[in-house]
């Protein structure tokens, strides 16, 4: 099972080649404005360096949101283009779930819950809570943080908070014995086990109609000098 995993949902973009649910090589770009220019080159480099041809690819998986509007469009458009060109199925993986998978793989704490946070500006984050089997405890949502946001969950379980939105929550939370703030760097490699599982279960999305999971509408402020 050979799957190309693509993630451009945040400021860090990456492409990972996975075989049988294990990442074998990952290429990363740390400048969000360069995602569109780098991703196709990463795909070509990974395939060349690992002697993989399009006919050997079984599926393309993409980090499908939530996250940056522009970043998500770049990743999904690239994944769709490859699927059309190579006649491959498309797998959509929640960005929050792949983050939870990545942190869980690092800490291996079966007694804790995992709360990824993606910065959505001001006091808002895209977030969810997952258990150690990556099942939703709190569904993905756009949340405006307050000091009481996760208190009921923290009273039940130890929770790892992580991602580029978590520092805002750490500043708000005075203290709680069950709150743990962990360092985390997002990577398409963290999709490997999830995309393999979805492939085995034939959980594919429709190429023609699939769009990213934005969670909130895109907003463009009006110019103060026009009525547009």
Image: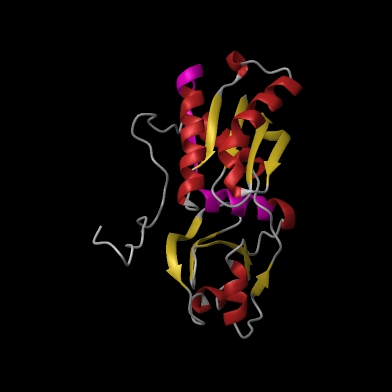
| Point 65% across, 46% down: residue | 187
Magenta stretch in the rendered image: 84-104
Q: Which quarter of the picture shows residue 208?
A: top left
Please state which of residues 58 and 32 is positioned toward the viewer in this rendering.
Answer: 32
| Point 72% across, 20% down: residue | 48
Rendered position, 72 above or below 228: above
Query: Is residue 78 something one can see in this rendering?
Result: yes
Residue 80 % position (x, y): 46, 29
| Point 54% across, 34% down: residue | 61
Queried whether the magenta region covers residue 98, the answer comes back as: yes
Queried whether the magenta region covers residue 150, the answer comes back as: no
Residue 94 % position (x, y): 50, 47
Q: Is residue 124 left or right of residue 116?
A: left
Name of the residue lying farthest toward the bottom = 174
Q: Quadrant of the N terminus?
A: top right
Name of the residue lying farthest toward the left = 227
Residue 56 % position (x, y): 62, 16
Residue 104 % position (x, y): 67, 54
Rendered position, 167 above or below 227: below
| Point 64% across, 29% down: residue | 41
Query: Is residue 201 something one can see in this rendering?
Result: no
State whether the magenta stretch is mostly helix, strand or loop: helix
Rendered position, 48 above or below 99: above
Q: Quadrant of the C terminus?
A: bottom left
Q: Is residue 37 left or right of residue 185?
A: left
């Amino acid at each position: 099972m050979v799957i190309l995993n693509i993630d451009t949902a945040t400021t860090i973009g990456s492409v990972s080649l996975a075989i049988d649910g294990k990442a074998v090589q990952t290429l990363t770009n740390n400048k969000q404005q360069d995602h569109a220019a780098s991703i196709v080159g990463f795909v070509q480099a990974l395939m060349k360096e690992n002697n993989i041809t399009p006919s050997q690819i079984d599926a393309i998986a993409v980090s499908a949101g939530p996250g940056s509007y522009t970043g998500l469009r770049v990743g999904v458009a690239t994944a769709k283009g490859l699927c059309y060109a190579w006649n491959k199925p498309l797998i959509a993986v929640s960005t929050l779930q792949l983050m939870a998978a990545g942190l869980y793989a690092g800490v291996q704490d079966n007694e804790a819950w995992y709360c990824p946070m993606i910065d959505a500006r001001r006091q808002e984050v895209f977030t969810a809570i997952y258990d150690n089997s990556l099942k939703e405890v709190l569904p993905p949502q756009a949340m405006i943080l307050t000091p009481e946001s996760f208190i009921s969950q923290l009273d039940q379980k130890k929770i790892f908070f992580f991602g580029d939105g978590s520092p805002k929550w750490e500043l708000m939370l005075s203290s709680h014995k069950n709150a743990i703030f962990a360092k985390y760097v997002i990577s398409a490699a963290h999709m490997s086990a999830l995309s393999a599982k979805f492939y085995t279960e034939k959980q594919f999305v429709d190429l023609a109609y699939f769009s990213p999971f934005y969670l909130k509408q895109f907003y463009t402020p009006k110019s103060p000098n026009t009525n547009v």
